[in-house]
Each structure stands twice: as structure tokens, then as C-alpha cells.
Image (cartoon, coloured by chain):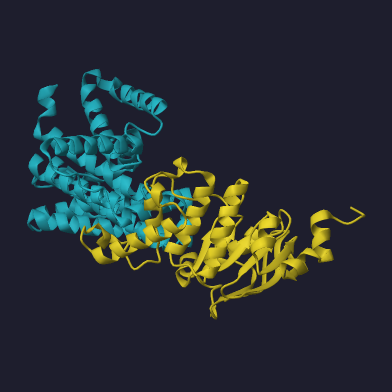
Chain colours: A cyan, B yellow
Amino acid sequence: MIEILTTPLFLDLLGINILLGVSWYIPASCGQFSFGHCGLIGIAAYLSGALTTLFGLPFPIAIFVGIGVSGVTGALFSAIGLKSKDIYAAIMTLALAQIAVVAFKAIPATGGIMGFLVTPKVTPSIVWTGVALCLLFTWRLERSRLGRTFEAIKTSNIVSSTLGLNTTYYKILAFGIGGGMAGLAGVFYAHCISWIEPQTFTIWLTVMSFTFALVGGWETMWGAVAGAMFLTLLLEAFRFANIWRNLIYGLLIMIVLGFRPSGLITRENVRGAGKLFSRIMTFRRKKSGRNSIPTR
Amino acid sequence: MLRIENITKHFGGVKAVTDVSITIDKGKIHGLIGPNGAGKTTLFKLITKVLTPDSGSIQFKNTRITHLPSYGISRLGIGYIFQESLLFRSMSLFENMLVCGNTPVNSGLLSLLPFYQAEERNRLEDKVREVLEQFNLWTKGELYPNQLSYGDRRRALIARGIINGASLLLLDEPSGGMNSSEREELSRDIIKLRQQGYTIFIIEHNLRLVMGICDRISVLNFGILISEGTPSEVANDKAVIEAYIGTKNE
């Protein structure tokens, strides 16, 4: 078991899953549910795979193009989806993602329905550097005015509008950021698994992304991180159960959500941990005779 | 300052507001009263474009605002303080005050940069402090909405409207659910705001409060404007008395 958990492939997939969970969490933090994540991941995977394998471009360029194109596509999905309201907007993003999947099948250069071989480029250090940068970005986002604006819109769209916030703009921005992060996951996935095919980017991938965030808790980014780690490890831990593995996996998700409907990590947990950390730091400063730093 | 002209809103067969015209003068407290279901809150929602009027027009500072979205109306200086206490529950009182779209501080991606617009941010935080002190809420800045009293939550909403740069405040039943001492404190706050040059348009069920602080009052009943004038004129208007108490035949 430990051997599997330390293989580069497992470490890569764990990092990619964290990116998936956090990328779904960002639009959700602005009250937007993305069902089109699979399409965004697929677009970046196909595009970056084609750039490195078919055109021989350097991997960093593929990363930037993947992030950029998925981010812009996510923003477009959102702009189109926002013509409808609530769940209809989410369904609209799913429909757009399905169009992307159909397009993958129709492109002969990328192997059509059979898919194509991508030159492997990623190592766990590359994936985890990406994960660390994305987490740092999201951590900063949550503490910024933009993060508070997202939170306000999630709580009440109407109140936010009457406070002078252009809610449509912020929703599109949230989708764009989440799309960009999903794009990075797609680029890493393509260059880790080395084989991409249209069947990979179905609704199941979207379900996986939001399951990470829901099980972990979608009030903070740490929930998405915890959910991705917990469920990825869980799936590996029950590998011995063969065909019963998915059944056990589903049952455990139901149990977790039954006992912790807000997910494994809530905002209260994070706040409590923050207070504990600041108390420890204050205690250490007092012990070393240094003045404490004002909180604001 | 605010001119509402022949505004109408019907929901199917229900005539929520019919052909209502009201003018709010700058620096005054204008009350809007009427029995339940008279269309008072609907009128506020029409002013702020939470609802779209069927017909009529609204002008604010000589600018037609009927075609603007909610955020555009807010940016012109109209602050809507909702009937329900709508502070963002996941944020402290201080953080709630910072969620304003009408300040010069950037709320976009650039706000992620720690030192970007440091001066503007400090200025905004100073303003928040000043306004919260005015409402005796500064010491409660670290508390979350569920840790505040109902009265404090209501007054915090007014404070947020001011921080957001509103010159006209639409207060929807601000004293609802308050005890008598909280209500008195609120009255003092509203009068103080008028002295500072703010214009107040207030919906209120507590007639004693309305009669005590308003310069003019408009009365709605079944979505129709039935009376308008000074508090004493309205109090003696037969149509108003009938709307509140009913006629002999009823």
C-alpha cells in the first residue's frame, strides 16, 4: 500500500485531483456551479498535448496556453450560461462541455474517437509546484477584496447588486479563474497519463471534481484539498476489493456526508485553527520578549 | 433629488403599485407608510431595479435611472437597506463594511496584490472606523452577525450604506423587531444623518417613529398613493384613517 502511495503516478494524480477540487471550488465560492468542468479540462489536455507532441513546442508554453484557453473558455461558458438562471445555468455549462467532447471525437489529427499518445513531460515536482502555486493563489484570493466579493455574491446576489457590485462580471471572472486552474489540471493529466481520449472527459470528471469539494467542504479551499486527498487515498486503499471498490467508495461518501453535511472541513474549523495558530505565535513571541503584531 | 413618475408594477392580476408619483427632496426624511401589502417594499425594489417597473420613470439627481441595472443605481448614490437583516454571515462586521462596490478600492484581480492601493485601502478602513464609531459599533467590529443584537445588525446595514457612498438611503422598516430603546437610538441616528446632509426615504410601521422624524409622508394603500403631506396633514387625512382603521361599512 505504502509503495503505491509513493509512486510518481499516484503523487501526480493526487496533485491533479487537488487541482480539480480547488478549480471547482472557485466558481462555487461565487455561487456558481460548474457542470462543464470536464470540457475545460479536456480542452486544455487536448490542446497542450497537441502543442507538445504534434508541434514540438516546449512544455511551459503548453502550460500557459492550456491555462489561458481553458480560462477564457470557462469565462465564455459562464457568460453564455448566465443567460439562464440557477440550475439552468449549470446545465448550460454541461451542454457546452459536451459540445467540446464531440469536437474532440471529430478531430482526426488528435486521433478522433481513439485518442492519441502524448509525450510524457510531468514529474511529481512539476505537478506539486503547480499545486502549491494554485493553493497560494486561492489562499490569497480568499483573503482579498475579490474573495469577499465572491462570498457576498454567493450569499446574496440581490444585496451584492444593490451594493454596487456588477455580479455578472464577478461570476464570469470566477468561472475564468476556475477554468484556468482546471486547464492546468488538464495539461498535467495529459502529460502524466500520456494517453488522452474523448471518453475521459465525460460528466464523470465533473462529478469527481465537485465530489472532492462537497465531501471535503465547499466553504473554504481547504475543504476541496482535504476532499481530494481523502477520496483519492480511499480509492487506492480499497483497491484490494476489486469490483466492490466503487460500491464501498460510494457508501463511504454517503456516510461522510450523512455525518458531516457541510463536509470534512468547515469555515469554523479553519477559523479555529487560525486562532490556535495566532495564540501559539503570540505565546512564542511573549516568551521571546517580542511585542505582538496588531491583528489589523 | 428623487422623482418617481407614474410608476406601475403588476404581478399578473395583482396590482402591486399603480401610477405612483412621489418626489423626495434633498436633505429631508420622507416617510412611506401604509397597511401590509400596500406596495411599499415593491416601490423600493422598483427604485433600485430589484424589480423592473411595467411603466413610468424614476429620476435621481436629474438622471433617468429606470434603464440602469441595480449596481449602476447604487453607484449613483442610492443605498437600499433591506427589510431583512442582510449582513453576510460568514464575515465579521468589519469585513461586511468592506464589501462595497462604490469605493475607489479595486475589487478585481489586482486586489490580490498585498501592497496594491495601500493608501486607498487605509483610507477606506479609516472611513469604516469613523462610521462604525458614529453608530457605536466600532468595538464590535470583530464580531460576526450572529453575535450581534438585532438592533446592531440593522444599524450596521445603514452604516454599510453610508460607507458605500450613498447620498439617498432607502430604509425598509429599520425599526422592525427592535425594542423601544433600540428604536430611540435608531431615531437619533436617522436625525443625525439628516443633519449630515443625507436624504432618507423610510418605510416604517411604527407610526410614532415616522411622525416624530419625517418631514413629509406618503401613504400607499393597495398600490395607490392615497395621501401625501406633512406628518400632521397625513395624520388628519380621512383617506389615511380609513385605510388604517377601515370604514363603518367594513
Q: Is residue A169 left or right of residue A193?
A: right
Provide residue A205's location: percent of width, then percent of height. 30, 41
Q: How many marks?
A: 0
Outermost residue toward the right in this view: B249
The residue at 31%/53% (across/down) is: A100
Q: Is residue A246 left or right of residue B227?
A: left
Q: Quadrant of residue A225 in the image? A: top left
Q: Is residue A273 above or below residue B162?
A: above
Q: In the image, what residue occupies the spot 77% across and 63% down?
A: B235
For the N terminus of chain A, the quadrant is: top left
Pick the front one: A37 or A225: A225
Q: Is residue A84 visible?
A: no
Q: Tell me which residue sits at (28%, 50%) in the image.
A: A143
| Residue at the image position 11 percent from the left and 37 percent from the top | A288
Residue B64 image position (x, y, % from top left): 55, 77
Residue A259 to residue A31: above or below: above
Q: Is residue A101 left or right of residue B43?
A: left
The vertical placement of A279 against B186, above or below, is: above
Q: Is residue B60 left or right of residue B121?
A: right
Relative image position of residue B222 (x, y in whole percent): 75, 60
Q: B55 or B117, which lies in front?
A: B117
Residue A88 screen position, x and y as percent = 47, 51
Instruction: Tell me, yes or no, if residue B168 can be seen here.
Output: yes
> In the image shown, does A79 or A31 lie closer to the viewer?
A31
Spot the residue most to the top. A241
